[in-house]
Amino acid sequence: MHQVKYGGELLSRLMDHLRSQLPGCEGVGLSVWPDGTPLRAVGVAVDLDQAQLDSGEGPLVDASRDERQTSGRIGGLAVVAVPGSWGDSGPVVLTVYLSHPPGIEDLKAIEEVEPLVATAAAVVEFCAGEVLRADQMVRMVQHRRYIEQAKGLVMAARSCAPGEAFEVLVRASQQTNVKLRDIATALVLTVGKTLEDGAEEIVEPPAAAGEAARGLWDSLHV
């Protein structure tokens, strides 16, 4: 597996931190799409990420294609594949391999670290003159901000913790087949009627995202 050298230590430390926060975590990997370039992997992710890239199937590939959090089993382990929005060409996907089915606390820990890993990967690739442009990095940060705002709306509506709010958004994304970043942006638009500063850089989400966001918002107030 090819792994970037520039900034590799930073990525490895972040991945090791995630492993330390997740009991039963057997490996963590990171890849950039649409070409499926592996950036870094530790533990079993070295082999299991590559196996999915070679075969063209598995949770990692599904998450990169649909840009939605995906889970499954690979090599006798549970795997959670989380795509991070960082441009129009494709996502960066974080894969986490667990010895047990992922629970709320696992998803919460992954959610907290994924933005750091994705941002570190973006900086590494940008500084290396590969994959990213400055405008892509700006869009990545903006998408992340709208996801956080959408989480806040769900938390307020359901009086729940951040991890549970994120899971609500993920389920809505999976059930409606709408990208997480689109449903989050649409939810912010549905409730607030406008986006914050820099919104001109964000492409308005598709109509399906608006319908999904309205349905989600209505369901939170039943």
Image (cartoon, helix red, strand yellow):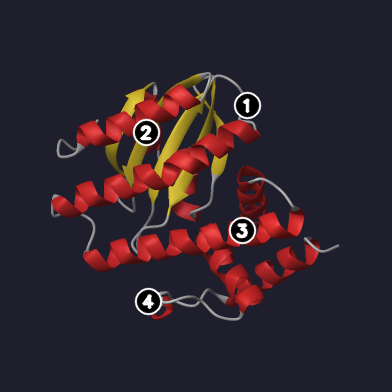
Q: Is residue 199 left or right of residue 8?
A: right
Instruction: Identify the residue under disc 1.
Output: 101
Instruction: Identify the residue under disc 3.
Output: 152
Q: Is residue 43 left or right of residue 188?
A: left
Relative depth, front residue between 158 and 23 = 158
- Image quadrant assignment for residue 180: bottom right
Callout 1: 10 Å neighbours few (<14), some, many (20+)? some
Q: Is residue 181 above or below residue 6?
A: below
Residue type at tag 2: Gly
Q: For the N terminus, which image quadrant?
A: top left
Could you tell which of marks 1 and 2 lies nearer the N-terminus?
2
Instruction: Identify the residue under disc 4.
Output: 201
Can residue 110 be seen here? The reply is yes
Name the spot of residue 189 as percent of width and height, x first.
59, 76
Which circle, 2 or 4, is nearer the viewer? 4
Could you tell which of marks 1 and 4 lies nearer the N-terminus?
1
Residue type at tag 4: Glu
Relative depth, front residue between 43 and 33 = 43
Contact (Cβ within 8 Å) of mark 4 with mark 3: no
